[in-house]
Amino acid sequence: MIAPFFILYFTFSLFPMLFSLGVSFFNWSGFGQAKFVGIENYVRVFHDPNFYKAIKNTVIIFCFSIPIELALGLMTATALKDFFSRTRGAFQLFNFLPYITTPVAVGIIFSLMFDWKSGAVNALINTFGGTSVYWLGVPWASRAVVVAMIVWKGYGYNMVMFMAGLSTIPDELYEAAKIDGASWWQGFKKITLPMLKPIFVFVVTTSIINAWKLFDEPQLLFSGEGQPIGGPERSVLTIIMRYYESAFRQFQFGYGSAIAYVLFIIIAIFSIVSVKSMNRDNTI
Amino acid sequence: MEEKKNLLAKIPVNVLIGLLSLVALFPFYLMLIMGTHYNEDLYTGIKLLPGNYLWENLQTVMKIDYPRYYLNSVTIAVCNTFGAVLVSSLGGYAFAKFNFRGKKGFFTFVIATLAIPMQLGLVGYVLEMKMLGIVNTILPMIFSGMASGFGTFFMTQFIGSSVPTEILESGRIDGCTDYGIFFKLVFPIIKPALITIGLLVFLWSWNSYMVPLVIVTRKECYTIPLSIAMISTEFRTDYAARILSLAISTIPIVGLFAFGSKYLIQGLTAGSVKG
């Protein structure tokens, strides 16, 4: 009964992975003769300025997006739990909708909303007397737009996670605190936050892992502009975008695969460290 | 006194959540509205009320073979969903209720697959599909999501905690085969989990952009996300029509999730709370 899973997994996931691993030791464009080059592709990854740029961009983006996402998710979750009862379901769905929207749609809508001349955001800024910002033409502004996209798309997912965590906290704790004269804020600080710690760890870990794999949104933000990959001065170039560019635009299958494997190692080290630290916390 | 205090706290919270929901919904609203305007009008300022150009935009959308891409997307997502649900629940059933050699190792493998980024094998996948000669069909996109490690893991947890072993034994006494028990007795019990995995796989498949992007070379095999992203070149001036096609592709999935959000939210959280 586990056979279908493993057969399908071996054929359509594991085999391609091993194949890619093999290809990463060759120079090959998919046609003609492949040339064995040993670890040369990997050496090249570590000398590729664009690769370092992609790492830097990713770290900058998630240093902003993850805290904002967490705060918004936690805020909506606690607010919905404590202050809404009849309309909770509807608000939950509203705030979750962005998460299920096609990334292509998110990219295109945001590129229109942040358009320099006709976008809604600059229109709003102008109404309040500010001057238009050339959002998609300046590196820092472009990163801000990508952060906005990620936050908009992701906080609803965090909200759902936190709501599940909140539902496991027994009501008696809050009642006892109330009898002792604790305010809502004290209850939040002394009961909610500590009890949600496992969820925090889980959400932060998965958010960072997903951030390393960022591709769709920044790619599509600049798809309609005829701009080079990665936006102005490649300020939103991510590792997967660099991978896509090398492997599928320039047809350097070997080099692309090497990038993918280096990324995999980054994610693997990160996952192992976070799983280890989670286990350590649990035993205390 | 108590009541009054609650009310005072309630108003700012209500306003805050209301505002946030507005921000969450605004891009959707904008999408629906922009699709009903004449393209040139979109550049003259922000539109907040529906226009009267819906029909003409719809005709432009139809001209680019949109129904075909829609059908591709539906076919891929539906095949993917049924395949993944069946494969995951079978695997989960075996892991949760049977003892066999190497079970622990196999299960560790399933968990390990969760940490592997899909992009890792993409080069190999494209080459493999080329060798199999199916690179110009929609099959590669159906196969790519079928063996879901997450689905199998989730089903194992769910079946392990919600299907009593006695039911399986009673089925066995009545002379059912293992597959008979699975389809007749286990399936009805795990319906919520089936819906959860089904919705998630459908969502991932429907929204998938990178796999079609690197695999599809013929226009006939475009999926909706790909067609919208790629056709920008032919279509580049007509943003209104593009947005309308986005709206048409987003509406069904929103409907699906409005109906299934309860199950979905259960499913998304199951991993984190138990884990």
Image: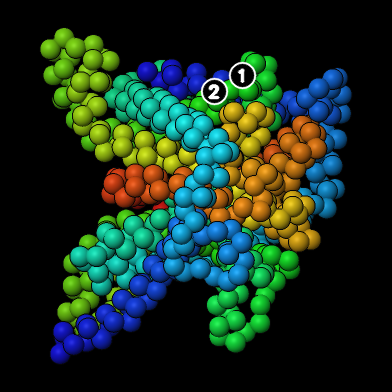
**Residue drawn at point x = 26 percent, y = 21 percent:** B182
Are the two marked residues, 2 and 1, in contact with CB atoms closer than 8 angstroms? yes
Q: Position of residue B26 (x, y in %)?
A: 45, 65
Instruction: Check disc 1 and report the residue beneath it.
Output: B134
Q: Determine which of the numbered discs, if any, sits on residue B121 in the image.
A: none
Q: Relative to the observer, which residue lies in front, A51 or A118?
A: A118
**Disc 2/disc 1 C-alpha distance (Å):** 7 Å
* Marks 2 and 1 on same chain: yes
Residue at disc 2, secondary structure: helix
B102 to A241, vertically: above or below:
above
Q: How is the structure coloured here? A: rainbow
Mark nearer the N terminus (2 vs 1)? 1
At 32% from the left edge and 25% from the top edge, which residue is drawn? B93
Relative placement, left or right, of A261 versus B274 is: right
| Mark 1 element type | loop
| Spot occupied by residue A101 in the image (x, y as percentages of width and height) | 47, 51
Q: Amino acid at mark 1?
A: Ile
Q: Which residue is mark 2?
A: B139
Image-based side of A208 in relation to B153, left or right: right
Q: Is residue A4 above or below residue B82?
A: above
Chain label for disc 2: B
Image position of A246 (left or right of A181): right
Which of the two residues, A105 or A191, is positioned nearer the viewer here? Answer: A105
Residue B84 position by quadrant: top left
Using a 10 Å C-alpha cutoff, classify the residue at mark 1 as few (fewer than 14 neighbours), some (14 to 19) or many (20 or more): few
Q: Position of residue A185 (x, y in %)?
A: 32, 79
Amino acid type indicated by mark 2: Leu
| Residue located 22% across and 82% down the image | B6
Residue B152 relative to residue A22: left or right:
left
